[in-house]
Image (tube, rainbow, N blue to C red):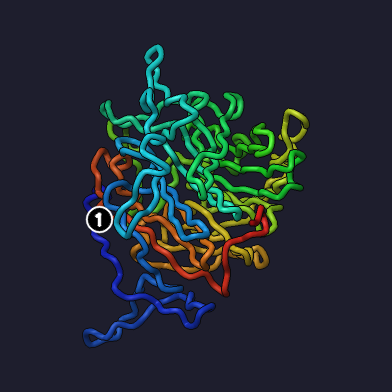
Amino acid sequence: MKLSTLLGLAGASSYTAAQNSTSYNTTLNSTFGTAGPRNVRIDTGTYGPQVEEFHYYYDQWPIGLAVSKQGRVFTCYTRGTYAYTLGEVVNTTAEAAYPSLALNTPPGGLYNVTNGIQFGSNDPNSFISVQALYITPDDTLWVLDTGRPTINESQAPSIPYAAPGGPKLVAINLTTNSIARTYTLPPNVHYPDSYMNDLRFDMRPNVTESGGGIAYIVDSSNEGRTGFIMIDLGTGESWRQLSQHPSTLRVNEDVPSYQGIPFYSRQKGSPLGFQQEGLDGAELSLYGDIIYYSPLTSDYLFSIETRYLRANPSNDTLSAKRAFDNVKNLGQRGGNANGFSSDNLGNVYMLMPNQNAIYIYNSTTLQAKPYVRDPRIVWPDSANVGFDGYIYFNINQLPYQPDWNDGNDGRQYPGLILRSRLPDGANKNMILGPST
């Protein structure tokens, strides 16, 4: 039976309220029913702080989001037929192209064909297909453009190869709403089949010789060449580490469950398959000395000291071996995780689509613990800890998308931005600077 025929989960009408402003009930939350001759114990499907419906998507299904110091909310959408790929929330039910529709419209189109092979646009000055967003403590909006839009003109959707210039990291000044700098990647760092998925920053001047800070970017290529891409933000130089390390590869024949339904990939024109994505979520520790990460299809959490990723193989021929040798397996955490976020108390939030929940990894106890669970969390795709003491997360019903269901779209608008208050007075981590 197709997953799309089983979509019927309604939003919860009640929540587990906060016990107080900083401590929430995250025990195994079952309750006793009162109907009938017996009190039968049931799972309410909720725990943790109240979940608020912050924004509703009615036009495009979201991927990434970021919240600024002033409370501006930015969102992105991987491009297929959408009019724009980077937007700003303008009210509770609408977004608009950001910074402008013109910057979201490559003059030469989203892709071209060379010798019968499809390539994404190589335009470094236009947004092609934005996958992730991040706002650093100085209130700069960072935009990660894969340069690989989805093409829907054939029997089955396809993603063209990347052309140099298309994949890029863009810094936007939110005061002037203008592009401050663009970083493109050479073909020996970003391969034609690379797919940049997420990003994190350490902007402190002492982490690179240039003093400009560093970006850590996840390459989650379905074609298999997963790994991390680093960019020295002072010089623009970039390099790779942990390429095809076992900790970054997909787990073969992984069968997760979403809303209680075992999931298999049913791509139009292809036989029954499995989720192909490897390395997906990543997050820095409080002081930036460790990065936590995992493949989407793995129940295991991994880490490595960031100094091994910051070593440029062009200057240190043994750096790749040292990185390979210093990956740590931190054990299972209770399911697959999609994206990560963190706060100024060192909590690492893991989005758990199998459980309709968000967990916290505690680096002191080396354990995962519950944070929030709610029936409306139908595939949390990205999360952002704001400057206001809330964590914001996108809900986009991804398991019901047509690409995974033989062309049948089981999603139902609206998509959502949900938010919950952080525990123990937590807020955005400002340590990794720069601050203003």
Q: Quadrant of the C terminus?
A: bottom right
Q: Where 286 sits versus 141, above or below?
A: below
Q: Residues within 10 Å of mark 1 (few under 14, many from 20)?
A: some
Image height of 258 relative to 79, above or below: below
Q: In the rendered image, is residue 239 in sight?
A: no
Answer with left or right where residue 365 lies relative to residue 26.
right
Residue 356 horizontal/vertical position (percent): 40, 61
* Residue 214 screen position, x and y as percent: 66, 43
Q: Nearer the viewer, residue 405 or 192?
A: 192
Dividing the picture into quadrants, the one containing residue 215 is top right
Q: Can you give x and y, in whole percent of width and height, for residue 122 in the image?
A: 47, 24
Q: Is residue 374 above or below residue 124?
A: below
Q: Nearer the viewer, residue 8 or 211?
A: 211
Q: Secondary structure at mark 1?
A: loop
Q: Residue at x 27, y 48 (%)?
A: 59
Q: Which residue occupies 38% across, 68% down?
A: 52
The quadrant holding residue 210 is top right
Q: Is residue 15 left or right of residue 412?
A: right
Residue 152 position within the rendered picture, expressed as x and y whole percent measured from the top left:
29, 31
Of all residues shown, which one is farthest toward the front?
Answer: 176
What amino acid is found at the position of numbered circle 1 in the picture?
Leu
Residue 386 visible at all: yes
Residue positioned most to the top = 115
Residue drawn at point x = 75 percent, y = 35 percent? 319
Q: Which residue is mark 1?
A: 7
Q: Residue furthest bottom?
A: 37
Taking depth in this image into account, of 219 and 36 the one nearest to the observer is 219
Q: How many marks?
A: 1
Residue 116, located in which quarter of the rendered image? Answer: top left
Residue lying at 28% horizontally and 34% vertically, measured from the top left: 268
